[in-house]
Image: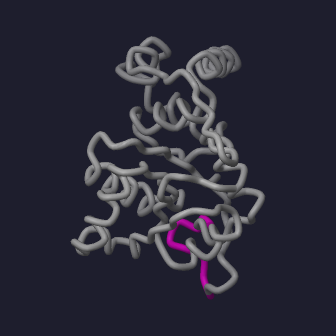
Amino acid sequence: MKVRQAVVVEGKYDKIALKNVIDGVIITTDGFGIYRSEDKIKLIQMYAKSVGLIILTDSDTAGQQIRGRIKSLVGDAQIINVYCPVIFGKERRKEHASKEGKLGVEGMSVEILREAFEKAGLSGDTDIVREPVTKQDMIALGLNGSPNSSALREKAAVTLGLPAKLSSNALRDAVSTMMGRDSFIEYINKLKGAEK
C-alpha cells in the first residue's frame, strides 16, 4: 500500500513490521526519545508541514503519550491517526509481555496492520475522505460533557477496536477517519439503544 504521508512509529521493530504493509517514509520516535531528540522533532515537523503525518503507536498508555507528544509538536498539521486493535500477548522477540500485556505494532500481523490503515481511511493510492465528527456531535451524543461520557466513550472505543482510554478529541479524530459522521452517529445511537 503506497502512502504519501510520513508514518511515525515508536521503534525500529515497528518500522520493520510496517515495511511489509506500506510503501512510504517511516520515521521512528525511538520510544520516548521524541521528548529529547531535537533532530527527530525537526524531521517530524518538516514532514508534517510538507506531506502530513500518519501516527501509528502501540495501543498502550505509553503509545498514547507518544501520540499526544507528536500532535503537540506539529500543531495544526494534517494528521491521520491509525490505531492498532488491543490484542493481549507478547512479541516473539521478547521474553515477557509488555507492562500492560498488549501487543505492540511489531506484534501485529500484516493483515491486522493493513486493516488498521483501511479503517483510518487509507487504502492504496487514494485517501478516503469522510465527513468529520464535530465537537458538537460528541456533546449531542453524550460522549462529552455528560455524567457518563467517559464510560460511553470507553465502550464505543473498545467496541470499535480502539484503545479504551481515548480522550474525547482522540476518539473524534479516529472515528472521523474510520467511519465518518453519519455512520458514527448511527453507531452510537445503536450502542446506546443496546444498553437499555
* Residue placed furthest toward the top: 140
Q: Position of residue 184 (x, y in %)?
A: 60, 22
Disc tally is 0
Q: Looking at the image, can residue 121 be seen?
A: yes
Residue in the picture at 50% in, 15% down? 141
- What secondary structure do most residues of the magenta stretch adopt? loop
Quadrant where the image shows the N terminus: bottom right
Q: Is 7 placed above or below 17 here? A: above
Residue at point 57%, 62% (across, down): 24
- Image x and y of residue 26, in percent: 51, 67
| Quarter of the figure with residue 33 | bottom left
Q: Which residue is rendered at x = 53% and y = 45% of the image?
A: 164
| Location of residue 153 in the rendering, given as x and y in whole percent from the top left corner | 50, 32
User: Which residue appears at 53% of the width and 57% of the height?
Assistant: 59
Q: Give residue 72's position: percent from left, percent from top.
A: 27, 50
Residue 12 is left or right of residue 126, and the answer is left
What's drawn in magenta, residue-wise? 95-103
Residue 101 inside the magenta-drawn segment: yes
Here the colouring is: one colour
